[in-house]
Structures are given as C-alpha cells and as structure tokens.
Amino acid sequence: MTLYIGLMSGTSLDGVDGALAQFDGAVTTTVAAAYIAFPPLLRAELMALQASGDNEIEREAMAANQLAQYYAQCVAELLRVSGRAPQDVRAVAVHGQTIRHRPELGFTRQTNNPALLAELCGIDVIADFRSRDVAAGGQGAPLVPAFHQALFGKEGQPRVVANIGGISNISVLSGDGRVVGFDTGPGNVLMDGWIHRHRRQEYDADGAWAASGKVVPGLLDELLKEPYLARAAPKSTGRELFHLAWLDARLAAHTAAAPEDVQRTLTEYTAVTLADAIKAYGGGADAVYICGGGAYNSVLMQALGAALGNQVMVASTQALGVAPNCVEALAFAWLGYRFTERLAGNLPAVTGANGERVLGALYPR
C-alpha cells in the first residue's frame, strides 16, 4: 500500500484540488481531499498569461512561484486532515497550470515550480506529465481516460465518464478494455467568463442565472458551427480557442439577446456538444457519469440528460463512490504512482501518441 498526493488546477483557474490516495494493486482509495482557492490577483495573472504580453517570462516565473505556495498549502491541508506526515507520502504528483496548449506546434506549457514545491513540502514531486506524450506525437491530452478505465471500467458494461471542467472531455469505456477519449469542447469556461463579465461572479452556482434565461436558437446554431466540433478524435483544446473574444465574434448578430439568455444558451452549448460527442463515440453506453465542477450545475446536468434522451442515465461519479471534484486530483496521484512504477500513463488511442510512455519528471525532496 502506497500513499500519493495528486494536485490539479484546471482551466477554470479557480484554485487547486488535492487528493491523498492509497494504491494497493488495482484498488484506489481516497484517504483525504482538500481545496485551496486562488486569490483574485493570481487568477487574473494566470488568465493574462494565456496570451503573449509584456515581460511574460518573468511574470510567468513569479506566478509559478506563487502557485507552488498554494500547492504546498493544499499538501499541508491534506496531511493535516489525514493525520499523516510528509514521510508517509511517496510523492506529490502535480499537474501545474496550463497557460498554452499547442500540440500542433509540438508543445504544451503547464506553469509550475516543482523544485520549490519539493523544498516546501519535503516530499518527492512529480510534474510535467503532458510533455512526453506531445514529444511522442500525441496531443498530451486528455490524460484522465487511462485513470477512468482503471477506476471506473467494468467488464461487459459500456459506460461513459465525462469531465466537465473549464473544458469538457469524455472517456468511453467499452467494457472490453478499449478506451476512446478526447476534449469535446467547452465545459464551464464560457459560462464562467460570461457571468464574470456581467455579474462579477466567478461561476454560475448551480446554474441559477442560466435558469432565469432561455436558449437563443440562432445563437446556439452559430456556436455549433465551430470547426473543432467536427474534427475527428484524437483532439484536444483549451482557452486558446474557447474564450470571450471567440464568443463576442459570434454574438455580433445577436446583440439583442439578454445576458441571462446568453448564459442559458452557453449552458445548452456545453450540454449539446458533450451529448453529440457521446452519441457519436459512446458505443451504446446507457450510463454517463459526470465529474468536475459541471456535476454541481443542475441546469447543465438536466440539459445534458435532455440532449441524450431518456435511454441514457446521467449521474455524477458520486454514484460510483467518488466525489466529482476529486476525480482529476486522484487521476494525477495515479499518474504519479504509474511514474514511480515505470508504467505508462498515456493511452495512444486517446492522445494519438506513437506509443505508450512513462509520463512525468521527478524532483526529489
């Protein structure tokens, strides 16, 4: 039995989710979970670093140092609530914060200072999980389908696991060991940006604002014309494509739409694009399990259920015994475990890499 910590800060830029996990052969157990929110100034800087700007190399380095401090706080909280000491943990596996994802150009950038994190925690740190897959010709994303198969796969029972973070991705678990996975399009990223612009809120809690509006059919049709949606898998995307400037260009012909109607339409957009991908690749699965922040948005969950139809059950991963906000952090703890065992962490059928690769880089304590 071995303990690992997984840390994930995603496209939503809200903070870091942490999980302390125990691995005993094929069994994964969540020992503790924690969340540390990022302060507004750090969130704003991480958002600004999504695009080129003045003095960005120094600014990125300083943001990475700040991130390491918050990652270390999350580690400390996990140790506190679990009653464990640093020496009880084999490694901290940290995703870092994606600021550029350009696999078509041969790189992906997750800013982080794992050396500083190792100093702060006194635990081995494993980082930079995506670069090796990209170097092998892959997208570097999504990486979670391999973990979804390990944790949620069940022989003879096809099912889909969908992560709705800033970006949505699916893992189609065929029930016979085969896995298909890719980024389907936006998750919360457009909804979060729109509500922040109009209401200065970081996210639409339980979809309450969206519930006050109605879908604008013409706008939805315009959003659905995005070429990325029609591309075949493997594929991945991020804020490089789906951002407010992208949305504004498509709103030009819908200036009369009320802000709450746009929010409802963006919620529908996430649901429809996810449902379309599940219908195209789902392989007859009659159950879809949702993780990530989107699982806590009842309007989005209802819209997804409606888009999929009555024959498909939609539930959160809590139905499988794992809290939706814990799954990605657990996935990176698992990738850290795979690294120390020198086992592959990617699925070439998902990322498009030339073969299986051990993912990550070690920063000893």
Image (cartoon, rainbow, N blue to C red):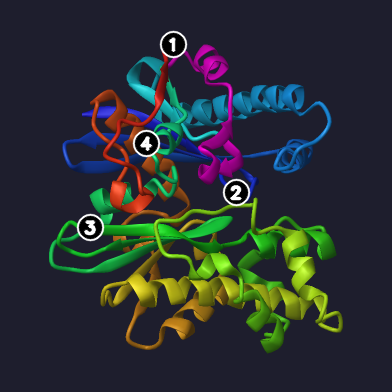
Q: Calculate the distance from the C-alpha at mark 2 to the C-alpha at mark 1.
A: 28 Å
Q: Calculate the distance from the C-alpha at mark 1 to the C-alpha at mark 4.
A: 28 Å
Q: Of circles 1 and 4, which is in front?
A: 4
Which residue sits at x=45%, y=33%? 131
Which kind of residue does numbered mark 1 sit on? Arg
Q: Relative to residue 363, is residue 19 depicted above or below?
A: below
Stretch of the chain drawn in magenta: 97-123
Considering the numbered disc 4 on the image, is that residue within a helix, a strand or a loop? loop
Q: Calculate the distance from the C-alpha at mark 2 to the C-alpha at mark 3.
A: 26 Å
Which residue sits at x=58%, y=55%? 166
| Residue 357 located left or right of residue 27 | right
Considering the numbered disc 2 on the image, is that residue within a helix, a strand or a loop? loop
Q: Of circles 4 and 3, which is in front?
A: 4
Nearer to us in this view, 192 or 217: 217
Nearer to us in this view, 219 or 286: 219
Q: Relative to residue 342, is residue 316 depicted above or below?
A: below
Residue on which the image places disc 1: 365
Which kind of residue does numbered mark 4 sit on? Ala
Q: Is residue 192 visible?
A: yes
Residue on which the image places disc 3: 153
Which residue sits at x=45%, y=76%? 276
Considering the numbered disc 1 on the image, is that residue within a helix, a strand or a loop? loop
- Give whichever of discs 2 and 1 has the lower sequence position: 2
In the picture, the disc for residue 136 is: 4
Nearer to us in this view, 125 or 284: 284
Which kind of residue does numbered mark 2 sit on? Thr
